[in-house]
Amino acid sequence: MGITNYILDGNMNIPRIKTIQPLPESRLLVTFVNGVQKLYDCREIMQLDRFQLLKNEVFFKLVAVDPGGYGVSWNDKMDLSEYELWTNGKAYA
């Protein structure tokens, strides 16, 4: 992996996102460029006003990887960073 596939955050290298897959129960399966997969549960953020639309299953499934892999988004106002998904996602095997 080249350095361009990672984002430097202090002493931690955060890999960019390769793919995103919406799953049942408001979860996201995130695959990073280093091959690591993490499961991110969106139910907690759905309690926040700005993420209320994610409760709509059809809208939730519209998630896409942002250009460059620096995050995922549903629209211009609703997104999650690669840092959030990497840090708060749970290992997936």
Image: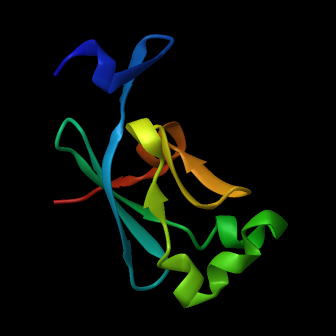
Q: Residue furthest right?
A: 49
Which residue is located at x 34 percent, y 23 percent?
6
Residue 86's place in the image compared with 46, above or below, is above
Which residue is located at x 58 percent, y 51 percent?
80
- Residue situated in front as seen by the camera: 47 or 75: 75
Horizontal placement of 86 versus 92: left or right?
A: right
- Residue situated in front as seen by the camera: 7 or 89: 7
Instruction: Report the coloring of the rendering.
Output: rainbow
Q: Residue 60: x percent and y percent?
A: 54, 78
- Residue situated in front as seen by the camera: 68 or 78: 68
Q: Residue 28: x percent and y percent?
A: 41, 67
> In the rendered image, which quarter contains the C terminus?
bottom left
> In the rendered image, which quarter contains the N terminus?
top left
Horizontal placement of 57 versus 49: left or right?
A: left
Which residue is located at x 47 percent, y 79 percent?
61
Residue 65's place in the image compared with 16, above or below, is below
Which residue is located at x 59 percent, y 74 percent?
43
Please state the total of marks drawn on the protein image.
0
Horizontal placement of 67 versus 32: left or right?
A: right
Q: Residue 2: x percent and y percent?
A: 20, 16
- Residue situated in front as seen by the camera: 93 or 60: 60
Residue 72's place in the image compared with 21, above or below, is above
Q: Residue 81: x percent and y percent?
A: 55, 43
Residue 79 position by quadrant: bottom right
Residue 39's place in the image compared with 17, above or below, is below
